[in-house]
């Protein structure tokens, strides 16, 4: 009896050390797994989604913040976190959905200065 060997190959992309700006600027395709870090600017329970999301920001200026959708972690404003998860677009909003790993780097950090935007931006 002959044995047949089947080789199954899975293909996926992981982008380590991705910046939030690279995601928001369109340099990363939706569906890509990324590793990002930033300062929590809107903590669990402070977003429109309630306890199921929070926002992190990396640096100043446009395209430096992103929504994190997860009810598995409780974070506070000023926490510096690193996380790994899948980047998705949901109704025109960039998100990292259900990160698999979140590491607290530090807490009590100063929040980035708010940006003043006009209605046409």
Image: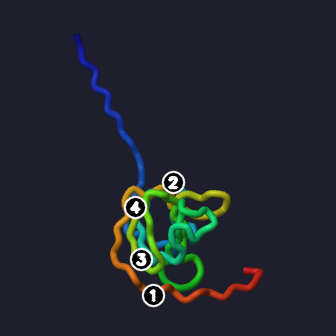
How far apart are labels 1 and 4 at the CA level? 23 Å
Which is nearer the N-term, disc 2 or disc 3? 2
Alpha-carbon neighbours of circle 1 within 10 Å: few (<14), some, or many (≥20)? few
Q: Residue 79 shows which numbered tag? A: 3
91 versus 60 height, above or below: above
> To which quarter of the image does residue 88 belong?
bottom right
How far apart are labels 2 and 3 at the CA level? 26 Å
Of residues 120 and 114, which is closer to you in this image?
A: 114
Alpha-carbon neighbours of circle 4 within 10 Å: few (<14), some, or many (≥20)? many
The reply to whether residue 24 is visible in this rendering is yes
Alpha-carbon neighbours of circle 3 within 10 Å: few (<14), some, or many (≥20)? many
Which is nearer the N-term, disc 4 or disc 2? 2
* Residue at horizontal 48 percent and vertical 78 percent from the top: 77
Left/right placement of residue 90 relative to residue 68 reads right
Residue at disc 4, secondary structure: strand
Residue at disc 2, secondary structure: loop
Of residues 55 and 76, which is closer to you in this image?
A: 76
Q: Specify how the rendered protein is coloured.
A: rainbow
Which label sits in the foreground, 4 or 2? Answer: 4
């Amino acid at each position: 009896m002959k044995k047949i060997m089947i080789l199954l190959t899975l293909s996926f992309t992981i982008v380590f050390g991705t910046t939030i700006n690279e995601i928001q600027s369109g340099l990363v395709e939706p569906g890509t797994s990324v590793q990002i870090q930033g300062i929590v600017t809107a903590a669990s329970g402070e977003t429109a989604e309630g306890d199921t999301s929070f926002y992190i920001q990396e640096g100043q200026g446009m395209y430096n913040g992103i929504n994190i959708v997860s009810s598995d972690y409780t974070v506070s404003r000023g926490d510096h976190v690193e996380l790994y998860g899948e980047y998705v677009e949901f109704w025109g909003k960039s998100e990292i959905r259900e990160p698999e790993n979140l590491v607290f780097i530090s807490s009590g950090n100063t929040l980035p200065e708010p940006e003043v935007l006009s209605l046409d931006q």
